[in-house]
Image (spheres, rainbow, N blue to C red):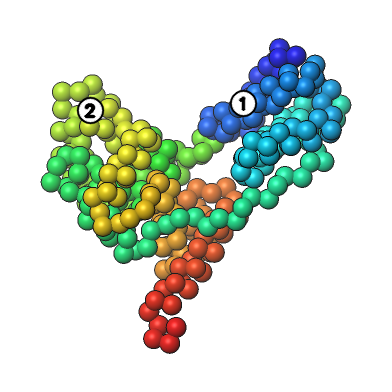
Amino acid sequence: MQKNVNVLLKLFIEYLQVEKNYSQYTVEHYKLDIANFSLFMSEQAIPALEQVTYVDVRIYLTKLYERKLARKSVARKISSLRSFYKFLLREKLVKENPFSLVSIPKAEKRLPDFFYEEEMAELFKACDDSSSLGQRNKALIELLYGTGIRVSECCQIKLKDVDMAVSTVLVHGKGHKERYVPFGSFAHDALSIYIQDGRHKLQSGRAPHDNLFVNFRGGPLTARGVREILNTLIEKSALTGKIHPHMLRHSFATHLLSNGADMRTVQELLGHAFLSSTQVYTHVTNEYLRKTYMSHHPRA
């Protein structure tokens, strides 16, 4: 049975990579979800994918809920398996899709966390640009907040991707999609100092590479490294609470919309394939405006 699943999974992965052009990150999620279902099949003594029934799917759902997984996680697993079977149906490798009648649980409505403009100012104050690492940290924060790019995208940026003459950066996004994103004068100044001074010193005597951001050893900076930098800056600042890298992306979108940017422009800058992904920020900005009103209007 395991061999049966592995062979069909390999075909499906090739389809995702070649025809759908999905990113490696997305493909890994599909592989994990299908591998987990394969273990369930072994436990239930189901010999082959074509013998999975709707009843089996309901039992699988029950086991997922018993593990107290978030609704979003359950929905992703069901969506992955539904897509897998849809592909198998297309290739005439199975006769029916047992996941087609299963309703995907609605995800909890959770608004993205973001920094207020005053909080962003405190975060920038925590960047001491008198040192090489401080120059890197300031350039990193300015670029993340100034462009709204994902941390994974930021870590992939090469020196050649940054055009200082026109203040734009070439971003390699999800699904191998590329987009040019502009950045402002603050990011431009911070990047100039970092590239000409801080990065040069951090790379001195190390194996050369062309990644824009480097760690304290001079090697390429990773997403984990970015998280550690942000946590350190939070501890140095007057801010309290937790921070995650995506908060800077959320802050970028929220502040643009709050200051009058149109939804389509923000969608393009964020690299969202669908406008619905960007529309979540309208709820954030409404709450932002409400809090601002309650804090500042004399009759609130």
How many numbered marks are there?
2
Q: Quadrant of the N terminus?
A: top right
Outermost bottom residue: 299
Q: Is there any visible trace of residue 239 in the rendered image?
A: yes
The secondary structure type at the circle numbered 2 is loop
Outermost left residue: 130
Residue at the spot 60% in from the left edge and 56% down from the top edge: 109
In this rendering, position of residue 171 left or right of residue 230: right
Foreground pick, 190 / 123 = 123
Quadrant of residue 197 within the rendered picture: top left
In this rendering, position of residue 33 left or right of residue 115: right
Q: Earlier in the sequence, mark 2 or mark 1?
A: 1
How far from the left and from the top, in percent, is residue 103? 77, 45
Q: Which mark is residue 217?
A: 2
Residue at the spot 54% in from the left edge and 36% down from the top edge: 175
Q: Which mark is residue 47?
A: none
The type of residue carrying mark 1 is: Lys
In this rendering, position of residue 285 left or right of residue 211: right
- At label 1, counting other C-alpha atoms closer than 10 Å, the crowd grade (few under 14, some 14-19, many 20 or more) is some
Foreground pick, 126 / 14 = 126
Which residue in the protein does label 1 denote? Answer: 31
How far from the left and from the top, in percent, is residue 20? 63, 33
Residue at the spot 23% in from the left edge and 21% down from the top edge: 207
In this rendering, position of residue 58 left or right of residue 110: right
